[in-house]
């Protein structure tokens, strides 16, 4: 059981293994797209892990990357079409980043490192947990960026009007792309310090 | 003509792949320990982008878009294959990378020595697929526009990774808090570089 909980903190795909960073940073200006993105990655990661694990003994090793890419892009197209049909505005906001799930290194990384050598059900669970570990970071970054940058959460205003009347201003810098990087840097810093203090005691 | 030049300058500085869209961050962080390898990877990305984006542009324009197939017969005027674009683009990229690898090995051994080890990595680099997807989103009027976009983005990526690698080399001599060493400081530096690049927004 322990190995499945790893992705949540100890082996977090973004903070520790630096996988799948590209999309993580670009979609976190607001909470809603970040949650949708996290869900999509979880679905794609779990399903493709499951399928690759089912056919792992029949894939010739030389062409396994192509096979993996095809399976992953099949699920990404499904997710993309579902998003376009049900959540059109969010899908416009995520624009190319849904398509870029194909080249998200978390998914290829889990396929290579886990699904090719494990049974289908453990692979499914591994995919789900890695998706959640990825999603956690996205949600934390998006929470701070939306709260400090636009004063809203999930498009609802959180900062009271009286603060604005008293001269409170939204920090416009938080919406701009560079702040996402700096926030992730700070998260790694905080996590690193926590680990060091626990390992010392 | 000035359009094409504008797209080029825009994609190098303002819409920089790394600082504005964070594309190709994984290899950007992993292969920037020293300037020489970083430059090699940057060149390879630049090269593959410049080849794949125009090819995907032609495929998109004459095969996938709604009404793109009218050159075969007017019956296809309402056929829309754009849902296939993800799978076709990634297949084209993987194919071209494989092809380039073989051509380099056979005819250009010197280039193969320099770029060879990076080529397999590039098939799954998000900057390459991202280039094609952005090209599709922006609806460029001619293939020359897409070529200038691809070249500009590639040079922007090369610029970013080389600058970052140079900073990282100097960083070896800096005192950084233990928990921030490695990736933590790398993210923060990229963020600061990105803020610097935002100065080009006013251009």
Image (spheres, coloured by chain):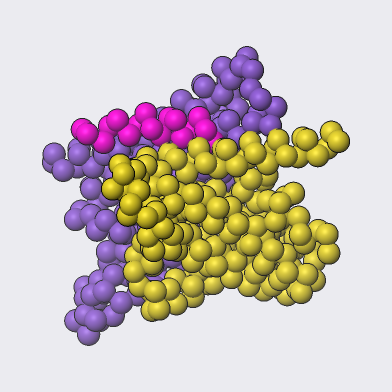
Chain colours: A yellow, B purple
Determine if the magenta segment contains residue B104: no
Residue A156 spot, x, y in % from top left: 39, 63
Residue A126 can be seen in this image: yes
Residue B76 spot, x, y in % from top left: 25, 81
Q: Does residue B39 sit above or below A73 in this rendering? A: above
Residue A96 spot, x, y in % from top left: 40, 59
Residue B155 can be seen in this image: no
Toward the viewer: A160 or B113?
A160
Residue drawn at the location 75% of the way across and 73% of the way down:
A120
Residue A60 spot, x, y in % from top left: 71, 65
Q: In which quadrant is the C terminus of chain A drawn? A: top right
Q: Which residues are magenta?
A: B187-203
Residue drawn at the location 76% of the way across and 74% of the way down:
A121
Residue sticking out furthest to the bottom: B75
Residue drawn at the location 27% of the way across and 64% of the way down:
B61
Is residue B10 rendered to the left or right of residue A113? Answer: left
Is residue B121 rendered to the left or right of residue A165? Answer: right
Is residue B199 rendered to the left or right of residue B160? Answer: left
Q: How many marks?
A: 0
Q: Main secondary structure of the magenta part?
A: helix
Toward the viewer: A140 or B14?
A140
Residue drawn at the location 56% of the way across and 38% of the way down:
A185
Q: Does residue A113 sit above or below B32 in this rendering? A: below
Toward the viewer: B118 or B129?
B129
Toward the viewer: A109 or B96?
A109
**Residue B36 picture quarter:** top right
**Residue B27 picture quarter:** top right
Is residue B130 rendered to the left or right of residue A52? Answer: left
């Amino acid at each position: 059981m322990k190995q499945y909980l790893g992705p949540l903190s100890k082996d977090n795909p973004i903070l520790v293994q630096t996988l799948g960073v590209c999309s993580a940073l670009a979609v976190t200006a607001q909470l809603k797209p970040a949650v949708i993105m996290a869900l999509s990655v979880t679905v794609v990661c779990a399903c493709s892990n499951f399928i690759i694990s089912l056919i792992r003994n029949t894939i010739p090793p030389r062409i396994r990357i192509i096979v993996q890419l095809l399976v992953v892009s099949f699920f990404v197209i499904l997710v993309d079409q579902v998003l376009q049909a049900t959540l059109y505005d969010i899908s416009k906001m995520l624009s190319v980043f849904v398509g870029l799930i194909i080249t998200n290194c978390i998914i290829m990384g889990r396929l290579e490192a886990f699904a090719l050598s494990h049974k289908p059900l453990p692979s499914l669970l591994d995919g789900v947990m890695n998706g959640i570990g990825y999603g956690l970071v996205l949600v934390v970054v998006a929470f701070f960026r939306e709260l400090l940058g636009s004063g809203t959460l999930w498009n609802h205003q959180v900062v009271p009007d009286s603060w604005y009347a008293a001269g409170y201003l939204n920090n416009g810098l938080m919406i701009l792309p560079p702040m996402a990087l700096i926030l992730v840097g700070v998260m790694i810093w905080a996590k690193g310090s926590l680990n060091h203090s626990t390992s010392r005691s | 003509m000035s359009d094409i030049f504008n797209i080029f300058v825009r994609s190098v500085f303002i819409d920089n792949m790394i600082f504005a869209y964070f594309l190709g961050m994984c290899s950007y962080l992993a292969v920037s320990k020293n300037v020489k390898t970083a430059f090699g990877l940057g060149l390879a990305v630049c090269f593959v982008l410049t080849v794949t984006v125009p090819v995907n542009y032609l495929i998109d324009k004459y095969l996938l878009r709604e009404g793109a197939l009218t050159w075969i017969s007017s019956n296809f005027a309402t056929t829309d294959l754009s849902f296939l674009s993800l799978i076709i683009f990634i297949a084209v990229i993987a194919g071209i990378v494989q092809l380039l690898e073989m051509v380099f090995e056979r005819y250009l051994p010197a280039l193969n020595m320099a770029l060879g080890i990076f080529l397999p990595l590039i098939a799954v680099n998000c900057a390459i697929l991202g280039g094609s997807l952005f090209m599709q989103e922006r609806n460029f009027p001619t293939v020359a526009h897409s070529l200038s976009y691809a070249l500009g983005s590639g040079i922007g990526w090369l610029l970013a990774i080389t600058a970052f690698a140079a900073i990282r080399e100097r960083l070896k001599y800096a005192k950084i808090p233990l928990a921030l060493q490695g990736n933590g400081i790398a993210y923060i530096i990229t963020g600061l570089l990105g803020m610097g690049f935002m100065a080009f927004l006013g251009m």
